[in-house]
Amino acid sequence: MSAEGKIFYGETVEAAIQAGLTALRLPREAVEVEVLDEGSRGILGIGARMARVRITLRVLPEVSPVPSPEPVPAPEAPMGADADLARSVLSDLLRRMGFVAEITVRQLAGGPEEEPSLVLNVQAPGADVLIGPRGETLAALQHIVRLIVNQRAGRRINLFVDVQDYRERRRRSLERLAEQMAARAVKSGRTVYLEPMPPYERRIIHLALRDRSDVTTQSVGEGNRRRVTIIPRVSKG
């Protein structure tokens, strides 16, 4: 769904909203509704017009991708109500989308100033379609799950959604890319600009190169054009 949302019609406002939720396969709490036209029955059917609404995905504030110690996987164990809530929300969304999925939940121990995170991994036939180009569909699914879970819990629960271990495969790929581009920056003596990436992918690049003494990294740009630059350090001597 684009940032401008989508427009839906119905005989009443509620009918238009329901048409939108059905088409988008989203629960009511995951969207914002703007009533564009309440519609009219007209007189004896003359002058009647449909109700019209715009539906957009609710936006969560973006968490700053400032590099921090990479979380270390903790042993799988029951994580109480938070894990149960997150699994239930994700399972319900997937069911609405026609998937019968197995969802495993594990916990990532946070760094010194980070809370532990929940990672929900989806395994289901045909679930690769939930990843989408460059993980965009997966990012949207994760956004919706976070939104609903946080609303129902009444507080922020740090969680990530993965499908068929895509994020782990992507992490390894990005770490290899980071090393290759760092070598290029050092060899050429010039700043290397990576392609635009979402916050969590930029963070992987920053973390992969933070201990190198020959390069430094910086995020530049705005919005969905934000990218990582790899800058060779000038040798003193």
Image (tube, rainbow, N blue to C red):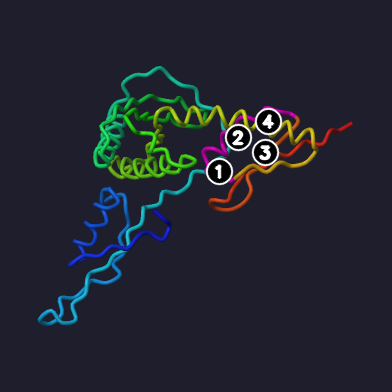
Q: Which mark is residue 223?
A: none
Instruction: Tell me residue 234's x, y (percent).
Output: 82, 36
Characterize the local packing of mark 4: few (<14), some (14-19) or many (20 or more) Cα atoms within 10 angstroms: few
Marks 1 and 4 sit apart, C-alpha to C-alpha, by 17 Å
Q: Which mark is residue 217?
A: 3
Residue corresponding to mark 2: 205
- Asked if the residue under mark 3 is in contact with the one under mark 2, i.e. CB atoms within 8 Å, the reply is yes
Marks 2 and 3 sit apart, C-alpha to C-alpha, by 8 Å
Determine whether the residue tagged by mark 3 lies in a helix, strand or loop.
strand
Residue 153 lies in the magenta-colored region: no
Residue range in magenta is 196-213
Q: Quadrant of residue 186?
A: top right
- The residue under the point 74% across, 29% down is 213
Amino acid tagged 1: Met
Residue that protrudes farthest toward the top in the picture: 75
Instruction: Tell me residue 70's x, y (percent).
Output: 54, 27
Q: Earlier in the sequence, mark 1 or mark 4?
A: 4
Relative to 35, 171 lies left or right:
right
- The residue under the point 23% across, 71% down is 38
